Amino acid sequence: MSTRPKYSDLPDGSAWDVLDPALGSLGLLTSERVAAAAKLAKTGKRFSLDLPLNLPSPSFFGREPFVHTIFSLGMANVYDDKLDNFFPQSSTQWDGFGHFGHAEKGFFGGRSGSQVEGATLGIEAWAAVGIAGRGVLLDVARHIDVPANEVFAISPDMLAASADAQKVELREGDVLCVRTGWLDWYKALDAAGREAVATASREHNFHDFQTPGIAPGPGIAEFLWDHGVAAIAVDNPAVEPMGPGGMGGPNESVHTCVLALLGIPLGEFFDLDALADDCASDGAYEFLFTSAPLGIPGGLGSPPNALAIK
């Protein structure tokens, strides 16, 4: 039985005083829970949840593509390579605690922007222990008519309805993966369509850049906290909806209520399509989830290097 306070008992929706200052809600991933989750790997089927590092292309939100160079080490049969201009949050990613803060209270744990710039709230703490545990996929797009290119807020009730339809329950310490169907829609775009979406994202043109996502506000924060979700990963660009009103008020966004105040990592651009098809075929929506973020000292985000193993 959990001894954590209910969300309604948290002061102003903040869990800073009850969480590990470096791991946040990832502290729920105890050795016992990881060991139990490992038993879910029964068939050995593995699903990479990362997009290739060069997707989306063109990059979103003003980020830039990396430059990949292959070069000889001076011998005819020995080569090396390097990445320049690499944005760790350009493709599938975890948002670290230093990525987004509360407008008045600051970043996770009450850190200031200057502390974030001083590399005191980096993602290397996550990399040191890794992220592993029971993963649960809620394939909302398969159960609810979610428009892929419109502002659409997925409510706690919709998440619960999807869980009921799949006959799966959330447990404390789960990594929750939510499929909205956006990435499947994006993959089907031609080059001109991808260019138009990327341009709209860079220009914050929310007439032409609209996505479904997890509803903002304290309701979703309460749902995730009281279910004991350790991390949430979604297949859209920002977890929450993009477009007019999609993120809610200044301190109602999922980034504020969930990442900054509850220490629950947010995953974006997770490729859940192949996993979703397999889960639909065998009816098993739970799996061993693993992720090895890059140990970037002071890093604000990282590719997840995530796997679902069934």
Image (cartoon, rainbow, N blue to C red):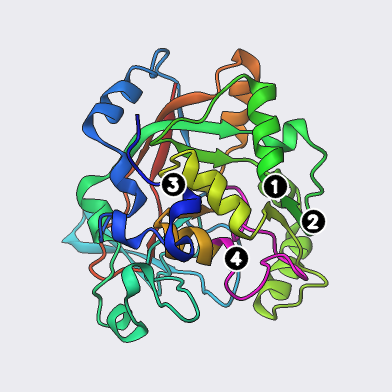
Dot 3: element: strand
Is 236 in the magenta?
yes
Residue 135 vs residue 269: left or right? left
Pair 2/1: label in front: 1
Q: What's drawn in magenta, residue-wise?
A: 234-254
Taking depth in this image into account, of 81 and 114 the one nearest to the observer is: 114
Determine whether the residue tagged by mark 2 lies in a helix, strand or loop: loop
Q: Position of residue 151 (x, y in %)?
A: 78, 59
Query: Dot 4 corresponds to which residue?
Result: 253
Q: Which residue is mark 1?
A: 155
Label whose residue precedes the other's in the sequence (2 or 4):
2
The amino acid type, in three-letter code, at marker 2 is Asn
Q: CA distance from mark 1 to mark 3?
A: 17 Å
Q: Nearer the viewer, mark 2 or mark 3?
A: 3
Image position of 159 (left or right of 275): right
The CA distance from mark 3 to mark 4 is 16 Å
- Residue type, mark 1 in image: Ser
